[in-house]
Image (cartoon, rainbow, N blue to C red):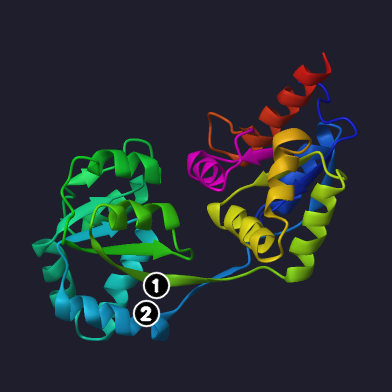
Amino acid sequence: MGNGLEGKRIAICGSRKIEEISTLIVKQGGVPIVRSLQGITFLAEKEVEPDLLKFVNEGADWVIFTTGVGLESLVSLSDRLGLKDQFLHIIRQSKVASRGYKTLAALKKLEIKPIAIDEDGTTKGLTRALETTDFIGKKVMIQLHGESAPVLTKFFVDRGAEVTKILPYQHMAPEAETVTRLCNEIMRQEIDAVCFTTAVQVRSLFQFARENGIFNNIINCFQKNVTAVAVGKVTAETLKEEGVERFITPEIERMGAMIIELSIFFKNQAE
């Protein structure tokens, strides 16, 4: 494949498989720059308990599950609280929608068949499946994972639903020093590409940019000088939601494929 990343400085925003990704970048002639934006996602049992109790007591017309691990954690927590049967009963009495194959697998284990599923593992795919559904005055509970998912929430609110959220896993932002450094490197064009491996990393960067009044600057850099790279569909979708129109994503959702795709992109640019 040659060395399509020759001399290119590539920021890695993940916290997993850093050495492997760095080695791939070096093999392609690039310079890996580790700037983890993942932060910490943690199981927030005490924080989520009131929301879970409210859901069990009040129920919902629709229940939207977005991650398999989140669903499994809620089942485990309801079991520890002695509410598992009630929790599952409420879900089975509701209309269920599911995003992602892992979520679908977790529902299948519980013998719960969703009415609506995504076609491609993305939030947009799920909302497409629900476009013709009437949500006016309906109570919708959304299970999230570490982030607020504003686009998904807005979809239901705009259609007249009463939305509540449960986040069994919550997110602590990455160190401000790391995000500041990356933002400065992006704006100074000291980095050629930024590799995102989760939606959380994308949200972390742009939330920080908004809070510090540099959102438009960062967006402009991605549109002109710095290449955004997404490992897969969900991460790419989040980049779109944040306003990034120019980005690369591999057909095979793997970190290695992401680096090869980026190498090909730069090689084609040089020709």
Amino acid type shown at disc 1: Pro
Q: Earlier in the sequence, mark 2 or mark 1?
A: 2
Q: Percent x, y for residue 184? A: 83, 55
| The C terminus lies in quadrant | top right
Q: Which residues are magenta?
A: 228-246
Tally of marks:
2
Instruction: Give residue 168's mark.
Output: 1
Label 1, residues with CA under 10 Å away: few <14, some 14-19, many ≥20: many
Instruction: Give residue 48's mark.
Output: 2
Residue found at the far right of this picture? 7
Q: Quadrant of residue 2?
A: top right
Between 47 and 157, the one nearer to me in the picture: 157
Residue 253 lies, with reference to residue 99, above or below; the image says above
Between 254 and 236, the one nearer to me in the picture: 236
Residue 194 lies, with reference to residue 180, above or below; the image says above
Q: Percent x, y for residue 107? A: 24, 55
Question: In screen coordinates, is 150 left or right of 220?
Answer: left
Residue 59 showing in the rendered view: yes
Q: Percent x, y for residue 56? A: 18, 77
- State yes or no: residue 134 in magenta: no
Residue 175 lies, with reference to residue 205, above or below; the image says below
Residue 79 showing in the rendered view: no
Amino acid type shown at disc 2: Val
- State yes or no: residue 240 in magenta: yes
- Write the residue at 81% across / 25% down: 4
Element on which disc 2 rests? helix
Q: Are marks 2 and 1 in contact (CB under 8 Å)?
A: yes
- Write the residue at 41% across / 83% down: 47
- Write the residue at 67% across / 52% down: 17
